[in-house]
Image (cartoon, helix red, strand yellow):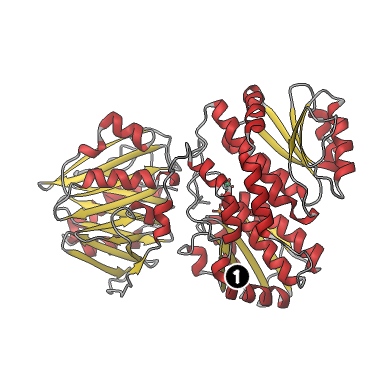
Amino acid sequence: MCSIIGYCSKGLAAAPIIVKGLKRMEYRGYDSVGVATESNNQIELKKATGKVDEVNLKVQLDSLPGKIGIGHTRWATHGKVTDINAHPHQSNSGKIAIVHNGIIENFEELKKQLENEGYSFKSETDSEVIANLLQKNYESTRDVKETIMKTVAEIKGHYTFVAMFENGQLAAARFHEPLIVGIGKDDYFLSSDVLGFIERTDEAIYVKNRNFVLMNSSGIQIFDFEGNETKSHIVKVSKEFADAYKGDYAHFTLKEISEQPTTIIKAGKKNSDEIAKAIDLIKHAKTLYITGSGTSYNAAVIAKYLFAKHAKIKAEIILASEFPFSPISIDQNSVVIAISQSGETADILESVDLAKKSNAKIISIVNNLMSSLVRRSSCVIGLNCGPEIGVAATKSFTAQLAIIYKITEELCDGCIGIDLKKVSDLISKLISNKSKIQLIAKELKEVTDIYVLGRGIHYPIASEAALKLKELTYIHAEGIPGGELKHGPLALMDSNVYVLIINPNDSTYDDTLTSAREIRARGAKIIGISNKSSDVYDHWIEIPTIDETMYPLIEIIPIQLLAYYAALEKDTDPDYPRNLAKSVTVK
Ligand code: AGP
């Protein structure tokens, strides 16, 4: 996933505004950055590997001249992380520059054709073919609209690109990747995310799929891929996007962990009608599936557990990336619950499309209410937790869980008796008592392997804990269902290993403590996460006592903090872990 931006204004310098927009969208991809601007009918370009601030310091992206420009932050898919592979890419004539997000599936074929016609390529990217194809089509049509129509008819894949022509004309085409127009007082934006322009305007047009935009300083026009002008509505974007600032926090990740006492209360709050609709759909479903990726999949596992235990409703959980390969029977009586923070994860969109082909109904539990997933869903429940910028999901996970608890509570006529206010207070206490966690984090600095053990409902939390630890610290981490220890993982236990035991004093307690003793006997160090102390723990992270069902919401908090502080010890960047992107819009 990458971020792209296009900007044109009547009076302001484009480059500094583009750099600011890229900085706010950096979560989408952060291995290289570039900006190109137009001035006096000439395109100038600067790009390099690194994060926005680093590259700007190195090459002064923001000093490029002109009032029109494009910019990009990259998450490499085709070709290594190098200066040459960074965007923008220029066509051979230098008269067109492009930035691209997505994948051009037929780039090899197009590249060969263009090479046969005399075009040459500098980068290993699929994106550079767009620049040369645009040049070829522009030379034959001398018309930007015709050029875009011809080009989108030739490229296959999922993409949004913004092209800048040497006369300052901008054009952007959208096919299954996001594109939003920002309308300012005296300027216009093209952007992957509202965050690209929220500092300057809250008026936006969400460009429809298979549409393209022509933009210059006097206005915009939007067309479908057949060239018919399309009507688009200007919407006011929620000011909450402006919250995407770190404030006094050192990192977004810490800010987002700290927001959880509030976000679990707000989860799904604006959506009581949609929750009622979801409950009706779930109750009447002949078959119920729950899908998600990464953290959102871990939330799905908890949903399966809660629905079965408390509402006697059976659901099948499927990793979104496995959905197309799973032998499942879906029809018009099936319901698929799709869980996703971004609503843009390619695997989840593909799963939902497959389910919709069989006329299944889709309930989405999603944070980004303008996402592609929302447009595919019959019922949408918003996480309502505000923008999550840290690549590792934290507050979105607990917001997903809070909604799942609310749904379960309705499905079982109030049998759990959930009290989210109480949970919120307990989370606040856990967050304020972090000194012990910070000390333990210091010990993890040299550790190479961490295992996380949990039984029953604590197993998906063990998986989520391992995911957070590996993302933030790059330490090898694995979640293990407690009882499986003796079926293999015990062979890995020795004095170099740390094991986190998720062990609240509930029905899983005794068995999990036995596993902890077996591990201790092999010399591994044990960190117990429990409301009850034990001599088996080398370190005890105390959590408060609560009803057994509610522990998942509590026990993940100290682990998020541990992963965050261990990342600081290891000097990794907790907000932007290497090789990752916030939402994975490629397969
Ligand atoms: C979580 O920390 C990860 N960054 C990742 O596993 C994420 O949960 C996954 O890619 C799914 O994203 P989504 O919720 O936006 O669909």
Q: Is 288 on the left-hand or right-hand side of 428?
A: right
| Label tally | 1
Q: Residue 495 falls in which quadrant of the image? A: top right
**Residue 113 seen anywhere in this rendered image of the structure:** no
Q: Is 52 on the left-hand or right-hand side of 137?
A: right
Q: Nearer the viewer, residue 382 or 84?
A: 382
Disc 1 residue type (three-letter): Ile
Relative image position of residue 123 (x, y in whole percent): 34, 38
Q: Is 226 on the left-hand or right-hand side of 220?
A: right
Rate crowding at label 1 as few (under 14), some (14 to 19) or many (20 or more) other CA atoms within 10 Å: many
Q: Nearer the viewer, residue 121 or 231?
A: 231
Relative image position of residue 433 (x, y in whole percent): 64, 37
Residue in the image at 71% along x and 45% along y:
555
**Residue 199 seen anywhere in this rendered image of the structure:** yes
Q: Which residue is mark 1?
A: 362
Q: Is 443 on the left-hand or right-hand side of 116?
A: right
Does the beta carbon of the residue at mark 1 sit less than 8 Å from ligand 1?
Answer: no
Whether residue 488 is situated above or below residue 425 in the rendered picture:
above
In the structure shown, which secondary structural element does the residue marked by tag 1 occupy?
A: strand
Relative image position of residue 145 (x, y in whole percent): 23, 64
Q: Residue 283 falls in which quadrant of the image? A: bottom right
Q: Nearer the viewer, residue 6 or 143?
A: 6
Relative image position of residue 148 (x, y in whole percent): 27, 61
Whether residue 486 is situated above or below residue 386 in the rendered picture:
above
Q: Nearer the viewer, residue 483 or 194?
A: 194
Q: Residue 301 falls in which quadrant of the image? A: bottom right
Residue in the image at 47% along x and 36% along y:
250
